Image (cartoon, rainbow, N blue to C red):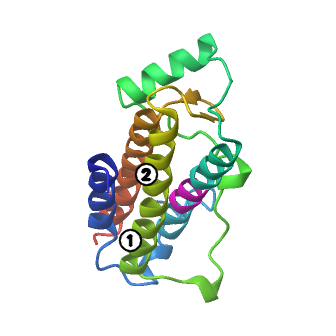
Amino acid sequence: MNPILDQLEDELARPLRGLTSTQTLLRSQPDPSRWSIWQIAQHLLLTYSSTSASLEDRLKKGVPTRSRITFQQTAAQLCVLRFGLLPGRREAPPFVAPPECPPDLLLTGDELASAASTGLDRMDTLLNKAEARFGTSPCNSHYILGPLSVPQWRRFHLVHGRHHIRQIDAIRRAHRL
């Protein structure tokens, strides 16, 4: 796996390791608008599968994105990709918003980490294919950041993952886990 995504995989596994399935339902506050650990992990899994699906579509088309970057996207890329800053309390788009946890999908932290590893591995394979086919030019567009190259996609997922890892760490601290 690419070193950046390998690092993300390790950093994400750390706060999930050893959590029971009941503990993954904990939130930092009893506020239902705040995500549980399970929901945070599901959101990350949804982002990995969304990126993978869009990369598969782009590879089938055989051409990189033709989208042109806007000034707002340039500013957003600078904040996220260069400085590693992701704005907090932004609502996730519906296609990556996690549901409430159904009882039949209750997973332990180790199971969530394993699922994340599988999702990252699949995404990494597709990013490698996109890089081989399209080089270092923007290959695919992010819904907010605009057209991104493969290295930028990797950096985005690392920054995004770290943002949510801090949330998981905060939940663990709040519950003294």
Res 113 label = 1
Residue labelled with disc 2: 164
Describe residue 169's horizontal placement relative to residue 26 as left or right.
Answer: left
Residue 170 image point, x, y percent: 35, 56
Disc 2 residue type (three-letter): His
Above or below, 130 against 74 in this view is below
110 relative to 124, above or below: below
Q: Is residue 17 above or below residue 91?
A: below
Q: Is residue 25 magenta?
A: no
Residue, x 44% and y 69% (percent of image)? 118
Sequence-wise, the earlier of marks 1 and 2 is 1
Of tags 1 and 2, which is closer to the observer? Answer: 1
Image point (44%, 45%), residue name: 157
Secondary structure, mark 2, is helix
Q: Which residues are magenta?
A: 44-49
Q: Tag 1: Cα neighbours inside 10 Å, few (<14), some, or many (≥20)?
A: many
